[in-house]
Image (tube, rainbow, N blue to C red):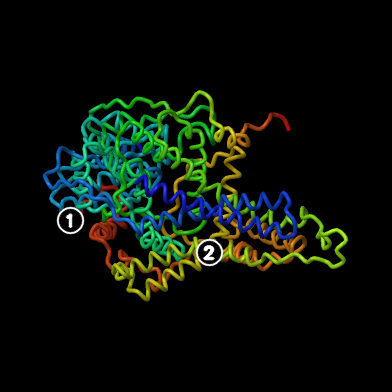
Amino acid sequence: MLLTRTVTLALSLAAAWGGFLLFLQFGAADGMDAMDIVRSALIFASTFWLAWGAVQALAGLTTRPPAVPRDTGSLRGVTAILVPVYNEDPVATFARIAAMDASLKAAGQAAQFHFAILSDTRDEAIAARERHWFLRLLEETGGEGRIFYRRRLSNKGRKAGNIEDFIKRSGAAYEFSVILDADSLIEGETLVEMVRRMQAAPGLGLLQTLPVIIRAQSRFGRAMQFAGTFYSPIFARGLAMMQGHTGPFWGHNAIVRTRAFAESCGMPELAGKPPFGGHILSHDYVEAALLARAGWQVRVDDDIAGSYEEAPGNIVDHAKRDRRWCQGNLQHSRLLAAPGLKPWSRFVFLQGILAYIAPVFWLGFILASIAAPLFAPPPDYFPVEFWPFPVLPVSQASKALGLAVGVFGLLFVPKLLILLDAALRGRVAGFGGGLRALASVLAELVFSSLIAPIFLMYQTRSVSQVLRGADGGWPAQTRGDGSLSLSDAWAASHWIVTTGALTIAATQWLSPVLVPWLLPVTLPMLAAPLIIAWSSRASRPGVFLTPTEWQPAPVMALQDLILSRWQGMETPVQDRDMPGPAVTHA
Amino acid sequence: MTDRSDRHSHDLDALVARLGALPEAPLAMPLQVIERATPGFFASLLRLGAQAPKAGH
């Protein structure tokens, strides 16, 4: 682990230093000025971040997960499965619970698990539906005494406070607690395996699974789903190799040792007001750091299959979620010096902050490059006194080109290597075979390049809002269809179009030679509404095929079966004559 | 009719409260110390821009 950390850090710093030197030579060709140093420094920071992602993939490709202790015996006690909900559709959420319960029954372990629906719903109409559908859920599953529902009067502390409230009231009844999101779905066998791995490792405080994105319908959603399914296992393995026993925890689809969590993770509010004070928004990273500080292991096991989640279906919803994460991660700047944390936990906080600051570095580099001619010294064609002939500066364009190739290499090569690895190991079969996986990877590279400038702008705005003291709040995510009209997309992105147009105009005026170099950034900005609307529409199968699309997991099939029976049953349960046949034996 | 509907709703809420009641098994969750008394350099740097705006126009 120490070797992996040292090598990955050294490689990232070397790449960043190389970028710095290349750009410095390029910029200094017509004489060094302050702007050259600023731009080179920005290149250093941006390249480091890109290289950090790339070496993480390399670490994932070149290492195998270490053997973990296994326990094949019977499960001890009862494990709580916590389902925090906040204004979500109860039909969809409770159908997932019914499906997981049915899957546990199929595994013969339903008695070893309790579900606790922890409602923080603020909308009274949705809360009323939750109560109706809770009764329906009990009826469907025969879950009385195993499935619980409570709604808090105040949602103090948001999700972290919701979990804390459960632990304070009922935590002593459960050795382990599985923490889910409202859109989480986990196979019964997977839940059993998670408990067994906790039983086998008494020092393990938290075990994180790698949730696979499912049920995406839109072009954007399916591209993200493909990227998450195809690339993420490799990146996660690299991350696991680097983090060792200090994380990560992503807030859901994980199991905790309840006592360890209670002893270590009581979360105070930070002094001051939001966005940097108040409730800790990205509590999961902090909880992982606190568990590690208390001496508990926090581990991600990327080999555990059967763990699923859903994701936003369009760029705008993704950006809204990203806005919350941005605020949460920047808030971690308050915790970098928290007493007693492991050094790597502090580094994880720093990484989270960099994830949102790095795009600002890129934007700063672009703006500095456009403005550079204003600061450049006048050309000196007679640098040698009394020499009668002009000395023309040697073009350093090849260095700029080399840097551009290097940047694209850091972005694309890891993904192509993952494709090669998947082909060699036969993993491409789940993605429609080698050719289709290749087509999907190429399409994803093009698509991610198109949307990158749009994300660059949204992230920059998020950072700016947080630094200005604007609290983004914690709205519920929009899930479901999620398609956007062109006017919706325009409303969400007209400022990006304006910024793109102004950028082109300023570049043409100040530094016309840069215009073609900036087109990959400015053209997607000009087309942002079209890209956002187009990518939110339903996608035809073809590229981006993932294993769960052509072969849905058993728990997904159970969920579909239950949902199809529940949809259209909005009538309160006590008003129906007969309950539907239980799906628990499906 | 309204009374009946209200009572019906009340009964339903009571049923949910009874069937949904979590086990009573309290577990202490002490608050952790996660901030130093004085903010670090990086935190101060990021917070510079997040100060509350001055009152007035």
- Nearer to us in this view, A96 or A436: A436
Instruction: Point out residue A418 in the picture as x, y percentages from the top left corner.
Output: 38, 64
- Mark 1 vs mark 2, CA separation in Å: 56 Å
Q: Which residue is pictured at 58% across the width and 37% down the height?
A: B46
Q: Nearer the viewer, mark 1 or mark 2?
A: 2
Tag of residue A365: none
The reply, left or right, for residue B13 in relation to residue A323 is left
**Looking at the image, is mark 1 or mark 2 earlier in the sequence?**
2
Instruction: Point out residue A582 in the picture as x, y percentages from the top left corner.
Output: 18, 54
Instruction: Point out residue A476 in the picture as x, y percentages from the top left corner.
Output: 44, 46
The chain identifier of the residue carrying mark 2 reads A
The reply to whether the C-beta atoms of the residues labelled 1 and 2 are less than 8 Å apart is no
Q: Do the residues at discs 1 and 2 belong to one chain?
A: yes
Residue on which the image places disc 2: A408
The answer, for residue A507, to whether it is visible in the render is yes
Instruction: Point out residue A486 in the picture as x, y percentages from the top left corner.
Output: 57, 64
Name the kind of residue labelled 1 in the image. Pro
The answer, for residue A213, to whether it is visible in the render is no
Q: Which residue is pictured at 46% across the width and 38% down the height?
A: A281
Label 1 Cα crowd, 10 Å radius (few <14 / some 14-19 / many 20+) = few
Q: Which residue is pictured at 42% across the width and 73% down the height?
A: A439
The chain identifier of the residue carrying mark 1 reads A
Residue on which the image places disc 1: A581
- Nearer to us in this view, A24 or A89: A24
Classify A133 as above or below A558. Answer: above
Q: Which secondary structure, mark 1?
A: loop
Name the kind of residue labelled 2 in the image. Phe
Q: Quadrant of residue A428?
A: bottom left
